[in-house]
Amino acid sequence: MRPTTLLFFIGILVSFSACRSDFETVASTGDLTFSRDTIYLDTVFTNIGSSTYRLKVYNHSKNDITIPTIQLGKGLSSKYRMTVDGMQGTNGKIFTNVDLLAKDSLYIFIETTATIADANPTDFLYTDQIQFDSGENLQKVALVTLIQDAVFLYPKRFADGTTETLPVGDEKIDGFYLDENDPVNGNELQFSNKKPYVIYGYAAVPSGKTVTFDAGARVYFHANSGLIVSNNASIHVNGATSTTDKLEKEVIFEGDRLEPEYSDVPGQWGTIWLTNGSTNNQLNHATIKNGTIGLLIQNNDGTTTTIKNTQIYNSANYGLLAQNAKINGENLVINNAGQASLACVYGGNYHFSHSTFNNNWNSSKQAAVLVSNYILGAIPEVKDLTEATFNNCIIYGSYSNEMILNKKTSAAFVYQFNNCLLKFDNTSNQFTTNPDYQFETDAAHYNAIILNKDPKFLKVSLNKFNIDETSAAFAKGNSAYLIPLDIIGNTRTLPPDLGAYQNKPFPK
């Protein structure tokens, strides 16, 4: 085609497109279809914006149509807001003359920010609807959000624009000290079960004070947030046995993203940090989920940190990281950590009974249990491990060797495993002559070890580590190490099962 002819046709096309408004449409007739008839925006905290949710709108007809109005039922007063195919409309509430091609679709994105006062006082639901067209052609999609009132704890912002910080070594982090006489929240060292708590930054327990969590308390941490128990301070988690799946008496620590897709995402917040010098720390019936390090315990003042009936799940680095600490643990369940579910390093003194340590992190070379008496580069580099005792425990997971012992001979390394089920599949024979892993012949360190047998947990992906009578851990415990009740309050029989759970038949 000659250049002049090509330019002639291009000119005709440009002229034609300039003469038409875009495309010819007819009015919609109420025949739209939707990807969902109700949008559940899940649970949000009062005055905190929700995630963005999507609705797809379809025009299955053969005609290009114009939808006269797409609007929120409560109009400009609605606490919801939308974008329609990238358009903002009037304050994100009302859109007029929205075109939709034949056999095509458009996207609507919905968010909300509401307070507890906006919700229905009987069920705390805030509702509205997206209305398409009107009169005989009116179509609706319902919007539903559960609003939770909460106590918000966060660093103060000063007049010069700076934010309150906490000293951590030679650095400072965003954080604040909990105040037992706060003019707004009252006693911030007493966490009740009346409302959930949302923490921004690191909340620290002042020296000489104790932070207490009542049974049923719920604590949600924002990203890069956590709890610090300072020198000469204490934490008491006073959870109790629950009778329903709602864990109504458990004390739960997790991230503040409440959408279902975040329910098992590791690394959403920082850690609960029991610092060097903290004292008389006690945790009972706690659930710690989705942190970077679930629980970090450093050398304290010599008192024992007691941890009972506690679950730690989905930690980006460690479930429980102890550095030269002193811990007594009963009925612990720790699963899924990027490095180790339980890491007892830099020496210390540890005693665990009837506990289940598992690691199913989706990678290789993670461990369920790591024990060592040194940290490379520390000063001093080694410290005595005066005790690491595991009685009636399960140590298992998806990797071939789920227990790692790292020691330097320049410091004490005392360990003992009694009546434990261990996964240590020495397939490459690299540990055959290692004196630390002689499970069958080293009676000084290993007694009644069950090696590489499947405990047959109920559902590892759901953190259900219950066992039944077919488990290799069934009735293999020693009554000398008996903890009478299991993690959920069931009475153990004799001989006891290994791990944190007393066996029961699985549901069909």
Image: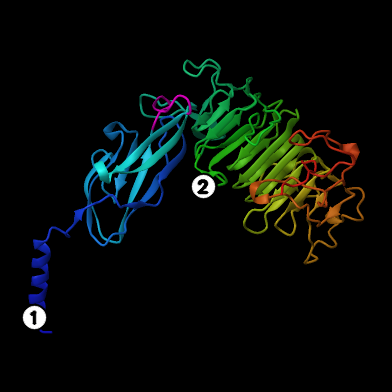
Q: Under tag 2, what secondary structure?
A: helix
Disc 2 and disc 1 in contact, CB within 8 angstroms: no
376 up-or-down from 324: above or below: below
Left or right: 306, with 445 as reference point:
left
Q: Which mark is residue 261?
A: 2
Magenta-highlighted residues: 114-123
Residue 276 spot, x, y in % from top left: 66, 32
Quadrant of the snapshot with the N terminus = bottom left
Q: Residue furthest front?
A: 136
Q: Does 119 appear in magenta? A: yes
**Residue type (three-letter) at the residue carrying disc 2:** Glu
- Magenta stretch: dominant secondary structure: loop
What colouring method underlies this structural image?
rainbow
Q: Does 134 appear in magenta? A: no
Left or right: 169, with 306 as reference point:
left
Instruction: State the image quarter where residue 168 is shown.
Output: top right
49 up-or-down from 55: above or below: above
Residue 407 spot, x, y in % from top left: 77, 50
Disc on the earlier residue, 2 or 1? 1
The residue that label 1 is drawn on is 5
Q: Under tag 1, what secondary structure?
A: helix
> Image point 72% across, 38% down: which residue?
324
Residue 45 spot, x, y in % from top left: 46, 32
Residue 57 spot, x, y in % from top left: 33, 52
Left or right: 439, with 382 as reference point:
right
**Residue type (three-letter) at the residue carrying disc 1:** Thr
